[in-house]
Amino acid sequence: MKTILAVTGLNFSFERNRAVLQNIEFQVAEGECLGIVGGNGAGKSTLLWCLLGLLKASGSIRFCGEAVSKGALARIGMVFQNPEDQLFMPTLINDVALPLVNRGLGISEAQRMALDRLDKLGLRDLAGRPATMLSIGERKRASIAAALIASPELLLLDEPTAELDGRSARQLADLLAQLAVTTIVTSHHLDFLRTITSRTVVLSKGRIIADGPTPDILANQSLLQAADLI
Amino acid sequence: MPALLAMSVAVAVAFMRDTGWEIAALLVSLVINIASWRSISKAMRAMLPIALFVLTLILLQWLYRRPDIMVAAKTLAVFWLTTAAFRWIPWSDLAGAIRPGSRASALILYLLFVRHFASILVVEAGRLLHARSRAVPKAYGHWAFRSLAAALVSLFVRAAIRAERFYAALLLKGLVE
């Protein structure tokens, strides 16, 4: 199976002598859904930022065999922890259509595709409303729609269940399970990860302490305890 | 059209040198701002932060013995005019007018970012000041002022963090270099 992302010897620190990520190594195959778990401050979000090249880390990050560049970023979708960081247009349909318009597609065609995407995510009726008027669950789905509109080869989700109630988290898990795109999701919501991921990497204090099938990882109580997850 | 007019007057006010014109512009901008709110009480409440800012500015000028009341007048006039302009801009129509690569689109996107970021900051500031008022019920005294200063510093830090994430989101959408 084709490797979409290969990370080798990744190290990162904000300050000298205080490493945030140390010797991170993993690969993600095409179509795989990888979970990254860890307690608060384990380095999950920092790792995502390093993968996108937004934080300069040492080591190697290869996306589809190439170093992550500006061109590669256009093929990666990201769903931020706070949807307000990526939804800023006056209406939802414009938010979702914007990446297509920016790539040169006509506004009516982009809006038609955006409406289609919103429809698939159950947001068609809200297309004309601003993101600020939606519930947090709806905003999360809208940010996923915006991230998927340009058909990315890799989708990154940073704490997608943060602030969601149980029902919204379940709905989001169902939605993500249907996506046919390679996905990396960071979370400490273990039930959510059990539903959508096939493989899980456990981060603790900036190091990978386990990498394996999700059911095995989540059944290992001592491992979860060591990672501050229970 | 009213938004464009208010913005144009704001630019003109920034370059004014004549005191008489400056005072006239100040009064006109006040009327325009109140008109944009359609409610005097709402307009007055919204003016409180800028009034505090201008008072601080005058106090600092007085402390450094460099009083220049026209700077404060210009600040007020430009703020009132630009906020009125922002309230009148037809945002939904603007978003539909974006055409890739055009200079007008870059300006529209810039205005949309500013509006969005300002609204985030307003919400953040509201939450922060509310939390502070719950923790420090007294309006005066050492802890009241100290906590207010800490809250404002915290707001700047939050603004910087949000700006960083916002920039990352724009970068991923291919909207910034």
Image (tube, coloured by chain):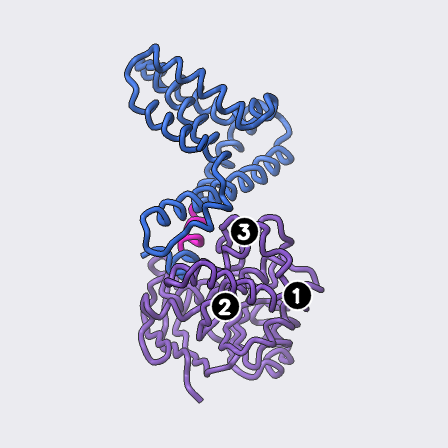
Chain colours: A purple, B blue
Res. A34 visible in picture:
yes
For the C terminus of chain B, which image quadrant?
bottom left
The crowd level at tag 1 (other Cα within 10 Å; few <14, some 14-19, many 20+) is many
Q: Name the residue under label 1.
A: A169
Instruction: Judge from the rendering whether residue B87 lies leftward or rightward of residue A170; answer left or right.
Output: left
Identify the disc placed on residue A91: 3
- Do residues under tags 2 and 1 come within 8 Å of each other at their CB atoms? no
Q: Seen in the image, is A105 located left or right of residue A219? A: left
Q: How far apart are marks 3 and 2 (CA)?
A: 17 Å
Q: Label 2: chain? A: A
- Residue B158 visible in the current orientation: no
Dividing the image into 4 quarters, which one contains the N terminus of chain B? top left
Numbered disc 3: what chain? A
> Is residue A68 located in the magenta-colored stretch of the structure?
no
Residue type at mark 3 is Thr
- Distance (Cα) linking label 1 and label 3: 24 Å
| Viewer-nearest residue: B20 or A210 | B20
Q: Main secondary structure of the magenta part?
A: helix
- Mark 3 and mark 2 on one chain: yes
Q: Check disc 2 and give the amino acid type.
A: Leu
Q: Which SS class for mark 2?
A: helix
| Location of mark 2 (residue) | A148
The amino acid beneath tag 1 is: Ala
* Element class at badge 1: helix
Q: Up-down: is A93 above or below A50?
A: above
Residue found farthest to the right: A167
**Residue B174 at what x, y percent from top left?**
37, 60
Q: Which of marks 1 and 3 is nearer the N terminus?
A: 3
Q: Do the dots labelled 2 and 1 sit on one chain?
A: yes
Q: Nearer the viewer, mark 1 or mark 3?
A: 3
- In the displayed structure, would residue A92 be above or below residue B60? below
Magenta segment range? B160-167
